[in-house]
Image: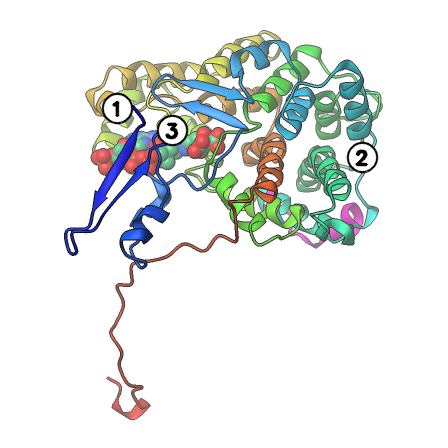
Amino acid sequence: MAETITIIDDRTGKQVTVPLTDGSFPSTALRELDADLRVYDPAYLSTAACKSAITYLDGDAGILRYRGYPIEQLAEKSTFLEVAYLLLNGDLPTAAELQQWTYDVTHHTYIHENMRKRFVDGFHYDAHPMGMFVSAAAALGTFYPDAKEIFDKKNLDRQILRLVAKMPTLAAMCYRFSTGLPFVLPNNSLTYSENFLNMMFKIGDDSHVNPVLAKAMDVLFILHADHEQNCGTTAMRVVASSNADPYSATAAAASALYGPLHGGANEAVVRMLEEIKTLDNVPAFIQSVKDGNGKLMGFGHRVYKNYDPRAKIIKKTAYDVFEVTGKNPLLDVALKLEEVALQDEYFVKRKLYPNVDFYSGLIYQALGFPVDMFTVLFAIPRTAGWLAHFSELLLDKEQKISRPRQVYTGSAERDYVPMVQRA
Ligand code: SDX
């Protein structure tokens, strides 16, 4: 039997029956009942704003797939560049396609010298790297006037290639500026993740990057590459819907990611762990969260009401990194927090589990990244996902400029009050 839903307007007795597709029905059904009928849905908890073939999540089952491939398999068997190709093109590349894509990305990692020498010097010495990164993403577009030609596929593909290739260079530029270290130029003999770590940490002539650490970086990039209609991707799609260029849209998405409830959580987790400091402070901290004094950062998720599958892989990757770098002392505090929270009714009842941000910061810290670089590390790989959504939206004939309605709660009409009559 076809799945349908019937909506009755009790004011008029009018009713409409519409098909249910994947648990959703078109909002046009409401307009059949009353042209001005709207659904009040703050933060879009029950709104499907688009159709997408990029990423599939099942929050209850803890499932995450990129173009149908389970994240566990991609993390184990793929590379970030191959995953970026998959997200952007819809299928895994052939050997020749991957070779060409890798060559193209590798040969687009340089940025204009004006970015490196003039643009970045405009920031204060203690500027937050994520604030610099958001600005640099938008500024990058000004070097490519043809970036606005988004309906010329060849041109859009070239802009997407530039953004994917240059994000690590921009990120390393922000970090080296903030430390007063000289900028390290991209090294085309290195892989994507090796090159990033080299641009970040190279001192002197040694360009060697530990393969275990490069692999861990690549796995973290894979895990952060896309995540369906999250806050940052929604920002990307809203800006793309006005046909803005992909650089400006990426800056908008990165701005949304910067928030502590979203991508800024990995930075907030480590600051929280540093504040707790020792195991015996864990029970008091958990109690303070339950008393409403702040959140257990890195826990909870709008969609996952089960363990975030990425958190499981990150936790495992942490041990590989700690084999090389030595264990991050904050790991024991994190493990204790998880153990206590997962047995506590407050968190169990609210289905609060570790999310992607709970353990990732411990790895970043062990790799040598300062805490204020963590959200930048999230934005680098997520750029590939954002751009996949940018392209998908442009091709979606059912999409148009985003312009939601509202429920007005302000004043009724009133006349202007001259100054002398104002209280
Ligand atoms: C990311 O959407 C994505 O896919 C995002 C992301 C991606 O890859 O793009 O997965 C990346 O952003 C992961 C989330 C990182 N953020 C954090 O770790 C910050 C801490 N988590 C929360 O702020 C919260 O869990 C959210 C923002 C992640 C989700 O919030 P929701 O879905 O709006 O849930 P809610 O705030 O309505 O919480 C429901 C209840 C509330 O309690 P009650 O009002 O019912 O009493 O759970 C409580 C909340 O107070 N709660 C928490 C909590 N998260 C929710 N209580 C303590 N600690 C927490 N972390």
Residue depth check, mark 2 versus mark 1: number of the one nearer the observer = 2
* Mark 2 vs mark 1, CA separation in Å: 46 Å
Q: Which mark is residue 386?
A: none
Type of amino acid under label 3: Asp
The CA span between labels 1 and 3 is 29 Å
Rendered location of residue 345, percent (x, y): 20, 20
**What residue is pinned by disc 2?**
108
On the image, which quarter does residue 279 sit in?
A: top left
On whether ligand 1 comes within 8 Å of the CB at mark 1, the answer is yes
Packing grade of label 2 (10 A; few <14, some 14-19, many >=20) is some
Q: Does residue 326 appear in the picture of this structure?
A: no
From the image, tell me which residue sits under label 1: 347
Q: Give the quarter of the figure containing the C terminus.
A: bottom left
Residue 125 colored in magenta in the image: yes
Q: CA distance from mark 2 to mark 3?
A: 40 Å
Ligand 1 resides in the quarter of the picture at top left
Residue at the image point whose x is 21% and y is 25% from the top: 346
Under circle 2, the secondary element is loop
The N terminus: image quadrant: top left
- 153 or 104, which is in the foreground? 153
Main secondary-structure element of the magenta-colored stretch: helix
Q: Quadrant of residue 299?
A: top left
Q: Which one is nearer the viewer's eye here, 63 or 369?
A: 63
Q: Residue 22 bears which disc, if any?
A: 3
Residue 395 vertical placement versus 87 (above, below)? below
In the foreground, 302 or 137: 302
Q: Element under label 1?
A: helix
x, y (%) of residue 92? 66, 18
Task: Report whether 269 appears left or right of 397.
Answer: left
User: Which span of residues is magenta-colored?
Assistant: 115-129
